[in-house]
Image (spheres, helix red, strand yellow):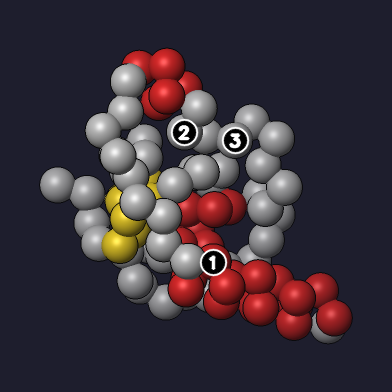
Amino acid sequence: MKYLKISFLLCLVMALAAFQCEDMSPNEMVDCIDPNNKYKDVACLMIYDPVCGCDQKTYGNSCEAQRAGVKSFTKGTCE
């Protein structure tokens, strides 16, 4: 139960923090995904609030993007 509360708070914080994706070079795109992602096992709420990851994929919300290892994202769907 304690893990669920921590996961919820972590996802809430992630949902409130949106990072701006700038134009990225190919080398920076490689750095877009964190290979040592410590959030990969976090449970995310099923709230649709889309974000566009620096990998140009749309995620259902910021928690899902973080869980996928995306280092930065913007609010809204990818175009």
What amino acid is found at the position of numbered circle 2 in the picture? Cys
Q: Residue furthest right?
A: 2
Amino acid marked by disc 1: Met
Q: Is residue 46 left or right of residue 58?
A: right
- Residue occupied by mark 3: 34
Residue in the picture at 44% in, 47% down: 72
As measured in the structure, the alpha-carbon distance from the residue carrying label 2 to the one carrying label 3 is 7 Å
Q: Position of residue 64 (x, y in %)?
A: 50, 58
From this viewpoint, is residue 59 visible? no
**Camera-side residue: 27 or 6?**
27
Point out residue 46 in the picture as x, y percentages from the top left corner: 47, 74
The label shown at residue 14 is 1
Place residue 75 in its image quadrant. Answer: bottom left
Q: Nearer the viewer, residue 55 or 43?
A: 55
18 or 56: nearer the viewer: 18
Give the amino acid at mark 3.
Answer: Asp
Residue of label 2: 32
Residue at the far left: name it. 79
Mark 1 burial class by Cα count in 10 Å: few <14, some 14-19, many 20+: some
Q: In the rendered structure, which disc, 1 or 3, sits on the residue that comes first in sequence? A: 1
Q: Please tell me which of labels 1 and 2 falls first in the chain.
A: 1
Is disc 3 placed on a helix, strand or loop?
Answer: loop
Q: Is residue 66 among what the camera can see? A: yes
Instruction: For label 3, count other residues whose C-alpha is less than 10 Å away and answer few (under 14), some (14-19) or many (20+).
Output: some
The answer to whether residue 38 is above or below residue 15 is: above
Per the image, label 1 sits on a secondary structure element best described as helix
Q: Secondary structure at mark 2?
A: loop
